[in-house]
């Protein structure tokens, strides 16, 4: 296969699926972090990364080539020229929810730290068993 | 007025949740009463709604938020099945709200207000999840229910905080997975309304995106419902949650995702599609494994609450098996078990909460001769334990009967075997409890909260306990009314078999 | 003719109601025991009031509510059910008097729970007798299982705990297997209503499936009826107080098991189908083995109650054998043996209990010369023992005679040999007690003076012993139980013209 062909494939891939691959990588990074990290704080941050990946996913599929921001300017009336605003609106809700979750998580973490004096998982579990 | 019942079920507790801390500040008891009254209102609304639906002959009632037409607007849909489930949710929430009052008598206004805010919010989230006809709206209510659930679990004490945090991590994964699945479906159809989705998806059911969605939905609702092997968070969470909220958390919180799963697979996708059937088979296998392993784990526990938590893993398995059988009777059994289990598990947590309130004891081996001091509580304990095993004429028997009937009719004998084995395993750990209660000598427990009058527990605790005990019997005797009069009206048109 | 009448439910409900009242009057022993006795009388009156109409060929039926979407919670008084219902409701009266005497005389603890569980057991027994379909039957059957458990662990010591466990393991396992069988039958036949002559037919499923189902279902009955090798729980349950043993072994639990086998054979599978698939023969072998083996084991027991328990194991297999022979007369004999054995064994157990309370003796080897102290009790004991062995003019003879004739009807005289052998064996394990009691001097010098059991215990013993003799001479005395049994057998094996005794 020629170099040009290869480039085409790569370009094509990046243009169509590239961003989704990145979202996927981000999602799994988040999950990986949540599973492997020993520190509750890090787990929580990884959780946020995972949530952001999902948000990105929605924003990505809302895009379309040549679409403009969905504000009615009085000139363009063809809905096909606007990008879909609904996923953005949904993701605003999701962001609020994730903020709320993070808030609760931090509150719980503070209490855990107060009680057990640590946010390292094995340490906390050891002290909790006592 | 009555046309606003669907939204009032959610709106009343929601406003009460917001007002509760404020009123608690004005007067320590006021916030509690606001919350309880709102739950009474929600319960009455849901009963009214259920009667309305049944009177319509099962025709679903649609409520459009702000009069925006679906598929653009958000709607609440009440069909017989979610009508009866939402009635169950509000009733259990009301009973646990009343039940939890004695636990809070020493706490300050902020704690009181916060507690009832969370309680009302949990009810909002769960009823919203059940009622909504909009898939993204379901996510929002799922998170409302989860966040208030984390709070109530964390209120249970130091270990509760830890359990809540761990549940929060895994619960968030579940919510994100649900959101991903929804993203796939939305990107294919451009709609979020469930009724609309079900029409638009019909010719896309063999696309890989749908397969992904089904897998993600199983994982997401599986985690939320504590379906084996996603149940890791659940024993700690149930064990260490606030004793007043435990009946609601254990009885209802994990059942609503199971209902959501039923709704997606049977109403939204339709069970005639091959991949939905494969998905249901997976749910059935996981359910069957959960039934066996949950029961075995429950036998090994000495902490009553932890035993109940593992038994919940098994009970969710029944619902999964009922769904997987996917026939007429299998689904009836699954829905009936959602209702039955809420009452059985709720009452058992109320019983152990009552014992804990009075004696501060939760281990099974120290319950000897407790019937002498708490006869009514032990009455409910016996009834609920027999129902969990599936001894007729309690409610638990009949959900097993319908599930078994479904399995036998569709010749899935492995599920019959699983049900028989699990009944026997249930019998081992529940008769062990009864044996301890009736045979063991009195361990001489110290009275933490000795009864003031003639009653064994404060009236606010005793009434819900007894009501639940009677409800389990009533569910058994009246199961035909529920099945024929309500559930059969709302079953999907297409079954797996 | 079918009469819609709620009386069957009243008969079941009255002792359930009594159980509640008993629970609430735990602090007042007299009130509590009044409820127990009153329930016994009302129940018996209700049941017996239905006998004339049933004898005339009518059936009382009532559906209280739908128990599932297609199956009703229905009770029906057919002749077969009435036999069992009459026996258990009638014997409830002497046992409840006896229980008062025994429990007070023995200063038992936890009497309230005892009386309540007792009342629930009787309700369940009547429900089992009168159920019109398998699901209603199963509901009462499981209720009986659960309600008997507190009676078994009554003593609340380690031994009682293990007996309770053993009892639960046997009964719950068989109960769940039976449930699976019931569901399968429902799926196959589309109905669960009992029908004389059976409602299953050979074209519903392959033979091996029907055979498997038969054994799944009969297991449930055989466990409660103590057919070997499933009898393990029965002797262990002996730790319970004697009125319980009397109830367990003579009236409610074991009879419910035997009755279950009869119901299954006569009203679910039907003799015709069973003869075709050949499953009943295996059951008959087991029953015959049990009859002999249990008698042999009984001979070695020194504890009187244990000896009687093994005798029960053997005697109940008569009923199972009679049912499994599928002959009209053997089925008649089986139904009548429910009556006969109930009367005789309740007498024997009440005698054993009277000895325990009055003389504080459990073991036969300590009973030398006890006849001097308790002549009436021991005389009643002797009558009942002779009946168990099948002496003419005692009730046991009539049922055994019919069983034997039934064996001839199907051309299996081997079973007659077994019946005779078992009669001799039961003489050899029951009569020595009489001999010791009356003719052996006591080495320790006990029992010199007359000291009968108190009247609460003595009168029930005399009543049941007298009835065993009266019914032995006039099998139709009172509620025409022989006719009822004969009607039941006739309805099961249609087209058969009467005979027998």
Image (cartoon, coloured by chain):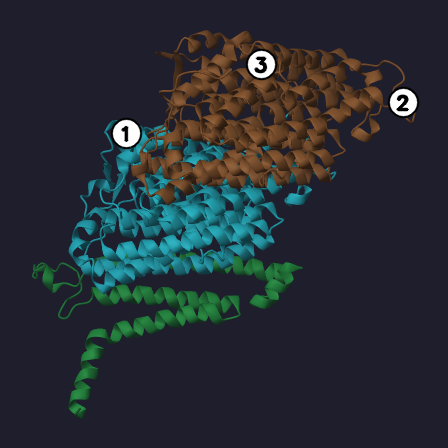
C407 sits to left or right of C5: right
Local SS, label 3: helix
Q: Earlier in the sequence, mark 2 or mark 3?
A: 3
Q: Of helix, strand and loop, which one carries label 1? A: helix
Question: Is mark 2 in CB contact (under 8 Å) with mark 3?
Answer: no
Residue at 59% x, 67% y is A122
Q: Tag on residue B54?
A: 1
In the image, taking residue C250 as reference, residue C494 lies left or right, namely: left
Q: Residue B264: horizontal and vertical position, in percent?
A: 28, 50
- Residue C124 percent coordinates (x, y): 52, 24
Identify the chain of the residue marked 3, using the numbered disc in the image. C
Count of labels in the image: 3
Q: Mark 3 = which residue?
A: C90
Letter of the chain in cyan = B
* Quarter placement of the N terminus of chain C: top left
- Eye-nearest disc, 2 or 3: 2
**What letter labels the chain drawn in green?**
A
The residue at 47%/10% (across/down) is C51
Binning the other alpha carbons within 10 Å of mark 3 as few (below 14), some (14 to 19) or many (20 upward) gives some
Q: Nearer the viewer, residue C398 or B169?
A: C398
Q: Find numbered disc 2 in the image and state the secondary structure of the residue it sits on.
A: loop
- Give the side of residue C326 with respect to residue B325, left or right: right
Q: Which residue is mark 2?
A: C446
B167 to C332, vertically: above or below = below
Give the image location of residue C300, x and y in percent: 73, 36
| Location of residue C240 (image quadrant) | top right
Task: Answer few, some or many: residues within 10 Å of disc 1's Cα (few below 14, many 20 plus, some between 14 and 19).
Answer: many
Q: Is residue C373 above or below residue B133?
A: above
Q: Are tags 2 and 3 found on a single chain?
A: yes
Question: Residue B169's spot in the image, x, y percent?
Answer: 46, 60
Chain drawn brown, letter?
Answer: C
């Amino acid at each position: 296969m020629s170099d040009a062909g290869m480039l085409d494939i790569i370009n094509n891939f990046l243009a169509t699926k590239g961003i989704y691959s990145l979202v996927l990588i981000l999602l799994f990074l988040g999950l990986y972090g949540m599973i492997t990290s020993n520190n509750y704080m890090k787990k929580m941050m990884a959780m946020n990364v995972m949530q952001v990946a999902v948000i990105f996913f929605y924003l990505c599929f809302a895009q379309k080539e040549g679409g403009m921001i969905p504000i009615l300017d009085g000139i363009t009336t063809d809905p096909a020229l606007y990008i879909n605003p609904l996923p953005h609106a949904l993701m605003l809700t999701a962001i609020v929810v994730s903020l709320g979750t993070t808030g609760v998580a931090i509150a719980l973490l503070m209490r855990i730290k107060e009680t057990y004096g640590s946010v390292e998982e094995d340490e906390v579990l050891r002290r909790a068993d006592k | 007025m009555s046309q606003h019942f669907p939204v009032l079920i959610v709106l009343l507790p929601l406003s009460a949740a917001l007002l509760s801390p404020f009123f608690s500040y004005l007067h320590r008891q006021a916030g509690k009463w606001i919350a309880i009254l709102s739950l009474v209102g929600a319960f009455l609304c849901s009963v009214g709604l259920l009667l309305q639906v049944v009177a319509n002959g099962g025709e679903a009632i649609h409520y459009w938020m702000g009069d925006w037409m679906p598929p653009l607007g958000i709607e609440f849909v009440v069909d017989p099945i979610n009508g009866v489930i939402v009635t169950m949710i509000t009733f259990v929430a009301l009973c646990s709200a009343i039940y939890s009052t004695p636990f809070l008598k020493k706490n300050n206004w902020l704690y009181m207000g916060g507690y009832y805010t969370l309680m009302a919010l949990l009810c909002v989230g769960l009823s919203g999840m059940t009622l909504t006809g909009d898939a993204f709206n379901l996510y929002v209510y799922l998170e409302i229910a989860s966040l208030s659930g984390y709070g109530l679990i964390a209120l249970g004490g130091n270990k509760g905080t830890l359990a809540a945090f761990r549940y929060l991590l895994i619960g968030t994964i579940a919510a994100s997975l649900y959101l991903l699945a929804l993203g796939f479906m939305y990107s294919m159809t451009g709609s979020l309304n469930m009724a609309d989705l079900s029409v638009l998806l019909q010719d896309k059911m063999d696309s890989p995106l749908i397969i992904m969605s089904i897998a993600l939905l199983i994982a997401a609702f599986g985690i939320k419902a504590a379906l084996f092997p996603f149940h890791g968070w659940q024993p700690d969470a149930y064990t260490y949650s606030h004793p007043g909220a435990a009946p609601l958390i254990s009885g209802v919180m994990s059942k609503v995702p199971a209902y959501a799963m039923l709704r997606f697979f049977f109403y939204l996708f339709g069970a005639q599609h091959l991949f939905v059937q494969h998905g249901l088979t997976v749910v059935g296998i996981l359910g069957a494994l959960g039934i066996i392993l949950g029961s075995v784990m429950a036998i090994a526990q000495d902490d009553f609450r932890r035993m109940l938590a593992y038994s919940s893993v098994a009970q969710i398995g029944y619902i999964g098996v009922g769904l997987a059988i996917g026939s007429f009777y299998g689904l009836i059994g699954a829905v009936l078990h959602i209702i039955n289990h809420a009452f059985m598990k709720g009452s058992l947590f109320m019983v152990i909460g009552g014992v804990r309130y009075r004696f501060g004891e939760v281990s099974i081996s120290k319950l000897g001769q407790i019937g002498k001091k708490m006869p009514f509580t032990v009455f409910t304990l016996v009834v609920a334990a027999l129902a969990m095993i599936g001894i007729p004429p309690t409610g638990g028997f009949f959900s097993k009967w319908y599930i078994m009937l479904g399995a036998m009719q569709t010749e899935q004998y492995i599920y019959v075997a699983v049900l028989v084995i699990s009944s026997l395993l249930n019998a081992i750990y529940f008769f062990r409890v009864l044996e301890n209660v009736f045979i063991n000598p009195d361990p001489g427990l110290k009275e933490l909260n000795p009864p003031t009058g003639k009653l064994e527990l404060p009236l606010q605790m005793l009434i819900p306990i007894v009501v639940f005990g009677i409800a389990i019997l009533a569910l058994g005797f009246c199961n035909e009314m529920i099945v024929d009069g309500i559930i059969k009206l709302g079953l999907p048109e297409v079954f797996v078999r | 003719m079918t009469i819609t009448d709620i009386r069957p439910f009243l008969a079941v409900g009255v002792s359930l109601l009594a159980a509640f009242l008993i629970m609430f009057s735990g602090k007042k022993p007299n009130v509590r025991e009044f409820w127990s006795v009153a329930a016994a009388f009302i129940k018996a009156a209700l049941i017996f009031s239905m006998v004339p109409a049933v004898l005339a060929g009518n059936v009382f039926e009532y559906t209280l509510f739908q128990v599932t979407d297609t199956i009703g919670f229905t009770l029906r008084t057919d002749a077969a059910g009435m036999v069992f219902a009459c026996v258990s409701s009638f014997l409830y009266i002497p046992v409840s008097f006896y229980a008062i005497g025994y429990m007070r005389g023995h200063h038992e603890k936890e009497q309230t729970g005892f009386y309540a569980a007792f009342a629930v057991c009787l309700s369940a027994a009547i429900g089992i007798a009168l159920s019109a379909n398998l699901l209603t039957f199963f509901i009462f059957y499981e209720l009986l299982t659960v309600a008997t458990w507190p009676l078994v662990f009554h003593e609340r010591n380690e031994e009682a705990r293990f007996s309770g466990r053993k009892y639960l393991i046997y009964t719950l396992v068989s109960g769940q297997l039976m449930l699976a069988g019931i569901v399968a039958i429902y799926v196959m036949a589309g109905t669960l209503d009992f029908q004389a002559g059976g409602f299953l037919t050979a074209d519903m499923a392959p033979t091996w499936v029907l055979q498997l189902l038969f054994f799944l279902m009969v297991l449930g009955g055989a466990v409660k009826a103590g057919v070997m090798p499933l009898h393990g729980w029965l002797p262990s349950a002996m730790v319970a107080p004697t009125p319980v043993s009397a109830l367990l072994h003579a009236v409610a639990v074991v009879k419910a098991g035997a009755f279950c086998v009869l119901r299954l054979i006569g009203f679910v599978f039907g003799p015709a189908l069973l003869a075709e698939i050949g499953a009943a023969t295996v059951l008959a072998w087991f029953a015959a083995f049990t009859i002999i083996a249990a008698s042999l084991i009984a001979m070695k027991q020194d504890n009187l109650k244990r000896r009687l328990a093994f005798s029960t194991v053997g005697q109940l297999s008569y009923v199972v054998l009679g049912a499994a022979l599928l002959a009209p007369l053997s089925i008649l004999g089986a139904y009548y043996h429910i009556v006969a054995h109930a009367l005789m064994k309740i007498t024997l157990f009440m005698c054993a209990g009277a000895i325990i309370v009055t003389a504080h003796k459990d073991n036969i080897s300590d009973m030398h010369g006890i006849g001097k102290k308790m002549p009436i009790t021991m005389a009643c004991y002797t009558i009942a023992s002779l009946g168990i062995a099948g002496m003419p003019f005692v009730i046991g003879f009539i049922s055994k005679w019919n069983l034997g004739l039934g064996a001839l009807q199907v051309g299996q005289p081997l079973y007659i040999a077994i019946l005779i052998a078992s009669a001799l064996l039961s003489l050899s394990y029951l009569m020595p007690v009489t001999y010791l009691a009356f003719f052996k001097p006591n080495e320790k010098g006990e029992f010199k003076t007359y000291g009968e059991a108190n009247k609460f215990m003595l009168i029930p013993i005399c009543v049941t012993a007298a009835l065993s003799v009266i019914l032995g001479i006039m099998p139709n005395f009172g509620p025409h139980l022989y006719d009822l049994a004969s009607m039941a057998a006739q309805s099961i094996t249609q087209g058969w013209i009467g005979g027998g005794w």
